[in-house]
Amino acid sequence: MRFETGQHMKLGQQMKLAPRMIQSMEILQLSVLALQERIEQELESNVALEQVEPGQRLDQDSPDAADDGPNEDRLDRRELVVGDSDATGSDADDFERLSVFESNYREAFDNTYSSERYSASRQSGERDRKMDAMANIAARGESLTDQLLHQWNFTDVDDETRAIGERLIGYINDDGLLDTDLDTIIEQNRSIPGVELTRESLERTLHELQRSLEPAGIAARDQRECLLLQVEALEQEDDASAPWSTVRRLIEDHFDDLLENRLPRIARETQLSMTEIQDAIALMRKLNLSPGRNLVPDSVAPIIPDVLVEYDDQSDQYVAALTDGLLPTLRISPRYEKMAKDKEVDPDTREFVAKNVRNATWLIDSINQRQNTLLRVVNVVLSRQREFFDHGPQHLKPMPMVDVADQLGIHVGTVSRAVAEKWMQTPRGMVPLRKFFSGGTETDSGEDVSWEAVKAMLREIVDAEDKSKPLSDEAIATELREKGIDIARRTVVKYRQQLNIPPARRRKIYAE
């Protein structure tokens, strides 16, 4: 084999996105909360970016403008952070600067329903109690593993059992279950100092964990064992007259039938009446399939809408307002903007400041472009989905993103980023903006209906059914056909699963 080196010419075309274009796309797809966080980071790292305080004019210099000379400490502290963020230093020259800024954003500026009242309340120092309440979420506490280890440390066991227990706790999942096979745990933990790990020692320690850790059900190997551990604990706490023995019997011998709602089969095999079975099932509501969630509940992030939609009686139209009043008003620092042009300033300092000014300018332009694009997309939604706002989700129309992109003269990717992770507060409740964009079908009468509307109709049919005789998937398809929606049974199954609606057998409620 022989290796050779040489030089060759190759002609080709490549499309590369400059950092500023990438930043613009990133800003576009941020939700209002994520954008707030991004702005705070930029304010911290960019000396040329300022927040306009309430009562301060945009053309008014900052309070520290009277200081003699630049704040050298601030420049030195941020030079590495910002200086590396703009490697080219001239990316702004590679693109047209959002040609004629005012014309590009005129739609946003001329929108009389823009969130002036929200920004006005912020300028006057008023607080929005609803927004404060949603944002006032407690800090994340200890993890489930840490809490279980703390409990285990107070258990009176020997050193070997304690060491094995600590390893087992590391395998407990967020639901509080030990879903890893014991043989696998042995294989992965052969080198515990001073401990001979065997299946017998693992099972002995696991039993001690199940007996000691709270809440009951922690460290169970499956859901069935988890429920049985809780029944054992509740038998000691509850009134002896409670039919826990029946509950235990059903879980031990008929767990799969319970999951599939096969109550008549259980009645035949156990000789229990339907009333006794249903009383036992009612008692099972005290049990928890995921006891670990009691210690570490799922965190729910606050949802703050990016768009507010209200009905205007005078114009008989739905109008949109962006929640941009929640964002700080930004500007380029007049002081540093002047310094970037002052040839008497040290060249290195002037170049550093100039880079910060360019970064700040592009950030402000990107935010304004985001607001303008989002508002234009929302206005198309309002005009084309009027029946949704009037009558509800059953009247959503098909609206592919490509159609909206063609109407606005922008790329479909821009529409996708504009609606990503955005929420709209409407008279119909809080709705993800992406929900309005889907394909659809045509009814027998020639009317266009989106797939989201079909799902809403399916949900409505299931909610109205007789639970003692729930509708099969074919029967649901038949009822949809009566409404003019001709879809196959397998499509009903797919949508039912997407809506987390169980099959008819599991929806059935048996008479006592």
Image (tube, rainbow, N blue to C red):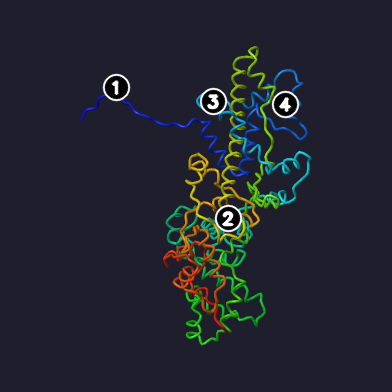
Per the model, the C-alpha gap separating discs 1 and 2 is 59 Å
Do labels 4 and 3 touch, CB within 8 Å?
A: no
Mark 1 surroundings: few (<14), some (14-19) or many (≥20) residues within 10 A: few
Per the model, the C-alpha gap separating discs 4 and 2 is 54 Å
Q: Residue at x 64, y 36 (%)?
A: 39
Q: Tell me the residue that label 1 is attached to.
A: 7
Per the model, the C-alpha gap separating discs 4 and 1 is 57 Å
Mark 3 surroundings: few (<14), some (14-19) or many (≥20) residues within 10 A: some
Q: Nearer the viewer, mark 3 or mark 2?
A: 3
Amino acid type of the residue that numbered disc 3 sits on in the rendered structure = Ala
Mark 4 surroundings: few (<14), some (14-19) or many (≥20) residues within 10 A: few
Amino acid type of the residue that numbered disc 2 sits on in the rendered structure = Thr
Q: Nearer the viewer, mark 4 or mark 2?
A: 4
Left or right, residue 423 beside residue 475: right
Looking at the image, residue 219 lies above or below residue 506 = above
Do labels 4 and 2 touch, CB within 8 Å?
A: no
Amino acid type of the residue that numbered disc 4 sits on in the rendered structure = Asp
Number of the label disc, if any, that sits on residue 304: none
Q: Tell me the residue that label 4 is attached to.
A: 59
Q: Helix, strand, or loop for circle 4?
A: loop
Left or right, residue 228 beside residue 1: right
Do labels 1 and 2 touch, CB within 8 Å?
A: no
Q: Position of residue 113 (x, y in %)?
A: 68, 44
Q: Tell me the residue that label 2 is attached to.
A: 145
Q: Nearer the viewer, mark 4 or mark 1?
A: 4
Q: Nearer the viewer, residue 275 or 429?
A: 429
Number of the label disc, if any, that sits on residue 92: 3
Per the model, the C-alpha gap separating discs 3 and 2 is 50 Å
* Mark closer to the chain start, 4 or 3: 4
* Mark closer to the chain start, 1 or 3: 1
